[in-house]
Amino acid sequence: MDLGSMGFLKVLLVAVYALDPYFSHAETVPNYSFVHESTTAPPVSYHDYIVVGGGTAGCPLAATLSETANVLVLERGGSPYRKPGKTDKGNFLLTLLDPSPDSYAQIFITEDGVYNHRARVLGGGTVFNAGFYSHAETEFVKESGLDEALVNDAYQWVENKVVFKAPLLQWQTAVRDGLLEAGVLPYNGFTNEHINGTKIGSTIFDMNDHRHSAADLLEYADPKNIIVYLHATVTKILFTTQTVGSRPRAIGVIYEDAMGEKHTAYLTNDSKSEIIVSAGAIGSSQLLMLSGIGPRSQLEPLGIKVVIDQPMVGRGMADNTLNGVFIPSPNPVELSLLSTVGISLLVNYIEAGSGLNLAPSFGWISKFLLSILDQVFTCNFIPLHILNGGIILQKVARPLSTGHLKLRSTDPNETPKVRFNYFQEPEDLRNCVQGMKTIINVVNSQAFSKFRYRTISTQQLLNVVAALPLNQRPRHFDTASSLEQFCNDTVMTFWHHHGGCQVGKVVDEDYKVIGVDGLRVIDASTFSFTPGTNPQATVMMLGRAMGVRIQKDRLS
């Protein structure tokens, strides 16, 4: 066969596999034949690609790579399908706040005193988030170095499987109209694009309120070319150096199963085989450090052999802040998560939810909140057996405040010390105050009056939030009377962690770890800011888009 024919064959293969979802080999959730517990894994195995982390980026990435290569996915958590309905819309808080050892969301507390979570489940954060789906801003796509056509195709690939039009019922409609009344203009209707003003986005909940997640994207995978191990915790990336002074090359990983048995997975003897870390903003930085890529000053005291002294690993860590108010309603409200959003570009985003049921497993929260309501309002017109109402939240769009991640130990199961330095930069605090003022204007709007008790002032609503144990930060005498102090004292996470392995600092524009061969990082740890109002759409897109790019490089 001549070179021209070989080139044509390669193009044909790429085209054929691009139609992968329509081929008969596809499997459907939850009946994946290629997903197994890691206790069944062999002691040693060989693969073209090893993806560490079967999360928001890892699932679409692995599914794509499996079209033309042998892929191993190592996920430290379990299956999102083991308890049907557990992750559906009505159980949002139940899943997020589950304190059990095998919960999907592993709780930790930042050094700033803020409660936080990191995913430990196939599908990552898409298994327990609020479901909002919206694209990144144009600027993010340009800075990512990804081809615009590839980005659009990747978004569509994701949307064909897991994305639905968000419903717009009474509460979300009132928030929408309140935002417009408050001046968050223009109204952009339903769109996935990131546009200044007020809009309705998409969701990963279907019309039956059933959640779909990044794990569903494994339906695109070729089951002959992929294996996923659950409860597989990677402890270390292995490197080799061919000659003295040459660049280290990643050659495999060591991982532990649920019983503590060690397994080793190696790359095949192919120069284009790679290990790709997609363990999230916290997990990816942590694993690089545990494997010897990080600040020498941190690694050596823990007895970790330094492969590359890379002081930027774990730096630039940031988290988008969440502040808001709870509004008790005199009228029934529907169950809704994030659908409407008010976008003030580069400043803040306003989102809302309603009808969340705290009572089934977290009755103490319901009782505490209701007792605070009763104390603050000194009245009995709110039925104490009902927690009826909703929340309006604001997120600082692009926090300038950044922090760092430091290892506590060499135990990969122990969450590192993470400090985000919330509101360290004055501009972040100003943006929060502006967002809170917008929320107050929405609550006071004519459009929202149906869901307001006329006798409850917005100051009283702030008093309620100030009295709640939302974090471990100290309260001040002026917490509720000063919006600046309110932002600082009641800050929560929006779970949009990013940084730690940023492009241009730890990885290059191809997401390859600088100074090392055979190793990439593809997830939100590479971001310098979170894309769009909520990043899950872009993280899933990135997994797909980079999978396509890596495929093409392999076939070239």
Image (cartoon, rainbow, N blue to C red):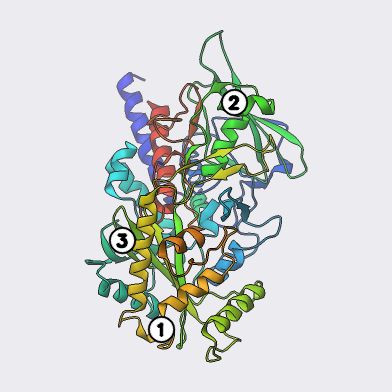
Per the image, the residue denoted by label 1 is 451
Given residues 82 and 539, the one toward you in this image is 539
Q: Secondary structure at mark 2?
A: helix
Question: Label 2, label 1: how many angstroms apart (C-alpha)?
Answer: 55 Å
Residue extending furthest bottom?
381
x and y, in percent, of residue 43 in the image:
73, 32
**Residue visible at 49% across and 49% down?**
56
Q: Residues within 10 Å of mark 1 (few under 14, many from 20)?
A: many
**Residue visible at 50% across and 77% down?**
355
Picture quarter with the N terminus: top left
Q: Secondary structure at mark 3?
A: strand
Q: Residues within 10 Å of mark 3 (few under 14, many from 20)?
A: many
Question: Label 1, label 3: how many angstroms apart (C-alpha)?
Answer: 22 Å
- Does 273 appear above or below 435? above
Question: What mark, if any, has residue 297 been given in the picture?
Answer: 2
Picture quarter with the C terminus: top left
Per the image, the residue denoted by label 3 is 343
Residue extending furthest top?
244
**Residue visible at 51% across and 32% down?**
313
